[in-house]
Image (cartoon, rainbow, N blue to C red):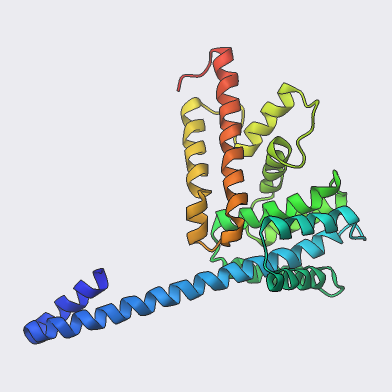
Amino acid sequence: MFAVLLGGFVGSLMGGPFGFILGALAGWFLSAYLRKQAGAGLAKIQSGFLDSMFAVMGALCKADGVVSQNEVQAAETVFAQLRLSGQQREQAIAAFNRGKASGFDLDAELLRFRQLSRGHPAILRMFLQVQISAVAADGQVHPAEHKMLLHIARGLGLPESQVAQLEAMLRGGGQGAAGGRSAGQQLADAYQVLGVAASISDADLKRTYRKLMNENHPDKLASQGLPDSMREMAERKTRDIASAYDLIREDRRRQGTNSV
């Protein structure tokens, strides 16, 4: 609408009422073209996300020298969670096999995806989270796998601390959640999920929580290129962030230190 009005205004300056009509039409066509281009760009990001995600997953699962049955099953679980069509599933398998093949250029793949995603931090963190979930499928993270996770974080332009933060999220609400973890361990993980120190003030804690919820909102991630099939995963992440925040607030309330 803005482009139509702007075109009409410019046209009226040049040709009166008739110029307004021509300018408005030109503005409408320009607006439609830009929407089409934006949609095509978003589709390209979504397709590239899935292709790079499974290629990097294949390389990561082979980091300890062998792709275990649990890791293969983890990839299959992701296929199912994303409700991939037959063709999409074949493409995902091909990408996974490409990643675990000798000669795979991990750095080039990470750079390509980083450029494709336009460096959106939340999209890059979601990409890293999927990798961590896959590699932790067998209940442990091999030292070689952990080293590669740090490498992947750096390749995406993310701080290495993101690996520990996402691992804490996995322990708190996903595959890695284990019975018998003490209240202290759960609380420590909650602080790590939010990426803050236990000494943070209530006001700063609340600001950090709101910022994380805003950055990771599924609708916002979708507008940045997250595939629609990954919406459920994004929603689960916001629930994990909210759960961590609630756990910290409840602990502070019990201790009488919560002032928010």
Q: Is residue 153 left or right of residue 24?
A: right
Question: Which residue is pictured at 84% across the width and 59% down the height?
Answer: 72
Q: Is residue 195 visible?
A: no
Residue 140 in picture, x, y percent from top left: 85, 44
Give the answer, above or below, for where 155 lies relative to 260. below
Q: Is residue 136 visible?
A: yes
Residue 230 figure quarter: bottom right
Question: Which residue is pictured at 63% across the width and 59% down the height?
Answer: 157
Question: Which residue is pictured at 50% across the width and 61% down the height?
Answer: 224
| Camera-side residue of 21 and 244 | 21
> Where, quadrant-wise, is the C terminus in this rendering?
top left
Residue 177 in picture, x, y percent from top left: 75, 36
The residue sitting at the front extreme is 86
Question: Which residue is pictured at 74% across the width and 50% down the height?
Answer: 133
Q: Is residue 110 left or right of residue 228?
A: right
Residue 26 in picture, x, y percent from top left: 25, 83
Q: Is residue 217 left or right of residue 129?
A: left
Residue 113 figure quarter: bottom right
Residue 195 in picture, x, y percent from top left: 61, 39
> Where, quadrant-wise, is the N terminus in this rendering?
bottom left
Residue 240 figure quarter: top right
| Camera-side residue of 81 and 38 | 81
The residue sitting at the right extreme is 65
Give the answer, above or below, for where 155 lies relative to 233. below
Give the answer, above or below, for where 154 lies relative to 197. below
Give the answer, above or below, for where 39 lies relative to 212. below
